[in-house]
Image: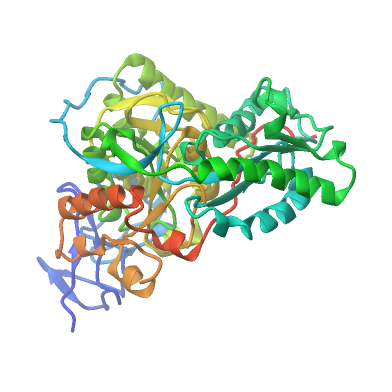
Amino acid sequence: MEKPILIRVHPQDNVEIVVNEKGIPAGTLIHDQLVAREHIPQSHKIALKDFAAEEEIIRYGEVIGYAKEPIAKGSWIDEHKVRLPQAPELEALPVATRIPAEQSPLLGYTFQGYKNPDGTVGTKNMLGITTTVQCVEGVLRIAVEELKALLPRYPHVDGIIPMYHSYGCGVAINAPDAVIPIRTIKNLAENPNLGGELLMVGLGCEKLVPERLFLDIPQDNLVLLQESMGFRPMVEEIKAKAVKILERLNTRRREVCPASDLVVGLQCGGSDAFSGVTANPALGYAADLLVRAGATVLFSEVSEVRDGVHLLTPRTISAEVGQKMKDEMAWYDHYLDLGSVDRDANPTPGNKKGGLANVVEKSLGSIAKSGTSPIVDVLSAGEKVRKKGLTFAATPASDFVCGTCQLASGITLQVFSTGRGTPYGLAMAPVIKVSTRTELATKWHDLIDINAGTIATGEATIESVGTDLFHYILAVASGEKKTWADQWGIENALCLFNPAPVT
């Protein structure tokens, strides 16, 4: 019989998680007279003690819930046996009380990037086409297909990104929360991977007029379909204006840039109970290295931070930044209340199958991505990054919405951890996929870029995988290595966060 392997993250934990791929059979002697009373699947929790009803269940050294019923030592603790605790009270949270000391800088690290006129640096050289309203999508799709056929003439252009979305009309354009999708569309158009170029396609009668995004937009950068004399003139005008930009983009070349010019987003999806043990701590270690090299790092996902926010507010660099984090949590609490749901609507069936009992356990694993650096700023959804260092970008946890918001904030590369597996990708920025389990990396050998599952089996450490990831980020940013998502051309649609009314 295979030797049982289990992981206990913190000395105070009264549960362990199973590493063995096939789980642990009932009757297995584990250690210290601990015997599995039933079959316990991989990544799920085993009780290290006898629990009375309402007794605390502790993982990561934190209370993840309360026993709904008596649980015998050696039993499987799944989501049905755990009662959700209350979320941390926001106003009582300390801010800027445990600001991490600055670590020694990492000097001399560089990558090959594309320098932009505004001082930003891209990791790709893409033509972006912004839309003001969904009505133009059908025509633009045809124009883009014809433009892609011309791309062999422009070998130094990485591709074309039409920014389709469902916003622009039939919406309460002046509602207070409309600022979120509007700034997201504007900031997507200014992502550093688009080379400082702008091409916009509108209809002509929509509520989101082009001038609301960019004042005094030149006619060479704008196409309004209602001004065209039929379908083919629409397509030809889009193509003609796009070709002029393609010609300029094709003259660009990569140049040596300091690692401090990188803007890296961190995200997780298809999480499991290994996320907070292997992949996310490795992401956190790499994040600390990036910050030490002067780069900008964003972590996000409000509902996957909310239950661990008491561990984050003390790391904010000032009372102002700490209060901003609490304000973003409160805004999202209210947003969920409007939909008559609470934060525990977040975990998916796959998360629970992967051993996560509830959103508290998921959150504690998720925030491991943030590493140990001070939190220098907090952004609202779709806001542009303002500072170098570690920033919390307050986005929804949905992979596609979070990815879109992070692109709007200015990331030029994303690192994405997954335990259950997802083929998610972004056209606008490379996505490095990190698996929490070796089994997933083996199964998806042509989708996973970095395997952090070796941490669970003791073949590697958080530090070694995090260091490897840091160097891989620099190589991907330089175009020296290509992520699997980019090799296969996997790209998910942009998905705006729009909490404002649709009329």
Q: Looking at this rendering, what residue extends furthest in the left direction? A: 32
User: Taking 5 as reference, is 124 left or right?
Assistant: right
Return the x and y of residue 332 as percentages of the image width and height.
53, 32
The mark total stands at 0
Indicate whether 108 appears above or below 9: above
Q: Quadrant of the N terminus?
A: bottom left
Q: Which residue shows up at 66% across the image and 54% down it? A: 147
Q: Is residue 139 visible?
A: yes
Closer-to-camera residue (135/37): 135
Q: Looking at this rendering, what residue extends furthest in the top direction? A: 319
Q: Looking at this rendering, what residue extends furthest in the bottom direction? A: 1
Q: Quadrant of the C terminus?
A: top right
Q: Which residue shows up at 67% across the image and 46% down it? A: 164
Return the x and y of residue 166 as percentages of the image width and height.
71, 43
Indicate whether 32 appears above or below 293: below
Return the x and y of residue 97 as percentages of the image width and height.
24, 20
Q: Say which quarter of the image contains residue 80.
A: bottom left
Indicate whether 145 appears above or below 337: below
Return the x and y of residue 403 as percentages of the image width and height.
50, 45
Q: Which residue shows up at 86% across the image and 36% down it? A: 227
Indicate whether 467 appears above or below 486: above
Closer-to-camera residue (84/264): 264
Closer-to-camera residue (195/204): 195
Q: Is residue 342 visible?
A: no
How did the renderer colour the structure?
Answer: rainbow
Q: Looking at this rendering, what residue extends furthest in the right direction? A: 229
Closer-to-camera residue (445/346): 445
